[in-house]
Image (cartoon, rainbow, N blue to C red):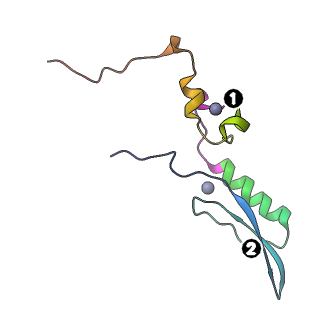
Amino acid sequence: MSSPATAIRHRPDIVRTASEYGTTYRMRCPCGTTGPEQAARRMAQVDLNTHVLSLPRVPAAQRCHDQARHDRRDWEPCAVCEHQMPLFDLTIPTSEEQS
Ligand SMILES: [Zn+2]
Ligand SMILES: [Zn+2]
């Protein structure tokens, strides 16, 4: 089984909802995570930050060095930059065992 860990992109956003009770703000992420309704945008921003911080950290080798160009965020591994890493520390896995 292989789990496509990069399939879901975390791009949380703050959704503003105006109702008869007033304006509320809510963090919403494409991964399905939503925050509670907040009375202030600042509070929803805290929920957003908390969600981002809860994400697993990207290994140093997969961190993006040009986020604007590669359309990556701090919490997203970058395949482009990963493949641009120098190969001096590459350990070749021995997938074939001969017995
Ligand atoms: Zn998310
Ligand atoms: Zn990159």
Question: Would residue 30 appear left or right of 90 to someone viewing this image?
Answer: right
The amino acid pointed to by label 1 is: His
The picture places residue 89, in percent across and down from the top left corner, at 51, 14
Residue position for label 2 = 37
State the predominant SS element of the stretch in magenta: loop
Numbered mark located on residue 95 in the image: none
**Label 1 within 8 A of ligand 2 by Cβ:** yes
The residue at the point 41 percent across, 47 percent down is 3
Q: Amino acid at mark 2?
A: Glu
Q: What is the CA distance from the residue labelled 2 to the residue labelled 1? A: 35 Å
In the displayed structure image, the side of residue 20 where residue 30 appears, left or right: left
**SS under mark 2:** loop
Along the viewing direction, whichever of 7 and 60 lies nearer the viewer: 7
The relative height of residue 79 versus residue 31 in the rendered view (above or below) is above
Proximity of marks 2 and 1: CB atoms separated by less than 8 Å: no
Most extreme residue toward the bottom, as rendered? 20
Badge 1 crowding class, 10 Å Cα cut-off, few under 14, some 14 to 19, many 20 or more, is some
Q: Which residue is mark 1?
A: 65
Q: Position of residue 62 (x, y in %)?
A: 58, 31
Residue drawn 74% across the image and 53% down it: 49
Residue 97 is situated, as x and y percent measured from the top left of the image, at: 21, 21
Residue stretch in magenta:
54-64
Residue lying farthest to the left in this orientation: 99
Magenta run includes residue 56: yes
Q: Quadrant of the C terminus?
A: top left
At a point 39% along the width and 17% down the height, the residue shown is 92
Mark with earlier residue (2, 1): 2
Circle 2: is it few (<14), some (14-19), or many (20+) Cα within 10 Å? some
Q: Nearer the viewer, residue 85 or 21?
A: 85
Residue 13, picture quadrant: bottom right
